[in-house]
Image (tube, grey):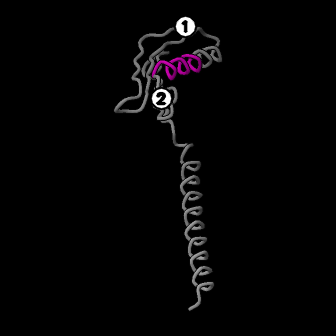
Amino acid sequence: MSLDVHVLMTMDFRREIIMREFVFVLVILSYIILFSGCAATNTGIVQIADDTYMYGKQDWQEYSGSVIKAGLYQEANAFCAKKGKKFVPITSTHQDYGFQWASAEIQFTCK
């Protein structure tokens, strides 16, 4: 085998490896984009008693539970406003990102 043929085979082999790595990266990015919609778990607003509601959310993309809680307050306020009532918070909890995803839960009433 001549030196030129060996060099060409080596270049084709390198090109094939680069192409496989490129395809691998594209597959990984596709999975990330596909599953990024699953980033947050949201209970939705759940009625737990007469005019008393609970709303919880967990988000792996957020570090601050307070930011999540603020969003819950905004949505709960809009929920009560649609009913022609005022939002009144009862209790709330939140957890910042650490060993678990950042999360928050609120309980509220509409008066």
Residue in the foreground of this view, choosing between 50 and 98: 98
Q: Earlier in the sequence, mark 2 or mark 1?
A: 2
Residue 83 shows which numbered tag? Answer: none
Which residue is at 50% across, 36% downward?
Answer: 40
Q: Residue furthest bottom?
A: 1
Residue on which disc 1 sits: 111
Residue in the foreground of this view, choosing between 20 and 83: 20
How far, Cα to Cα, is label 2 from label 1?
A: 23 Å
In the rendered view, would you say 68 is above or below 90? below
Dot 2 alpha-carbon crowd within 10 angstroms: few under 14, some 14 to 19, many 20 or more: many
Quarter of the view holding residue 17: bottom right
Which residue is at 48% across, 32% downward?
Answer: 59
Q: Nearer the viewer, mark 2 or mark 1?
A: 2
Q: In the visual, does 48 lie left or right of 3?
A: left
Name the quarter where the C terminus is drawn.
top right
Q: Amino acid at mark 2?
A: Lys
Dot 1 alpha-carbon crowd within 10 angstroms: few under 14, some 14 to 19, many 20 or more: few
- What is the x, y in percent for residue 9? 59, 81
Q: Amino acid at mark 1?
A: Lys
Residue on which disc 2 sits: 57
In the rendered view, would you say 33 is above or below 5? above
Quarter of the view holding residue 87: top right
Element under disc 1: loop
Q: Determine if the magenta segment contains residue 69.
A: yes
Residue in the foreground of this view, choosing between 31 and 72: 31
Look at the image and give the residue range highlighted in magenta: 65-76
Which residue is at 61% across, 71% downward?
Answer: 15
Q: Residue furthest left?
A: 99
Which residue is at 49% across, 12% downward?
Answer: 109
- What is the x, y in percent for residue 33? 59, 48
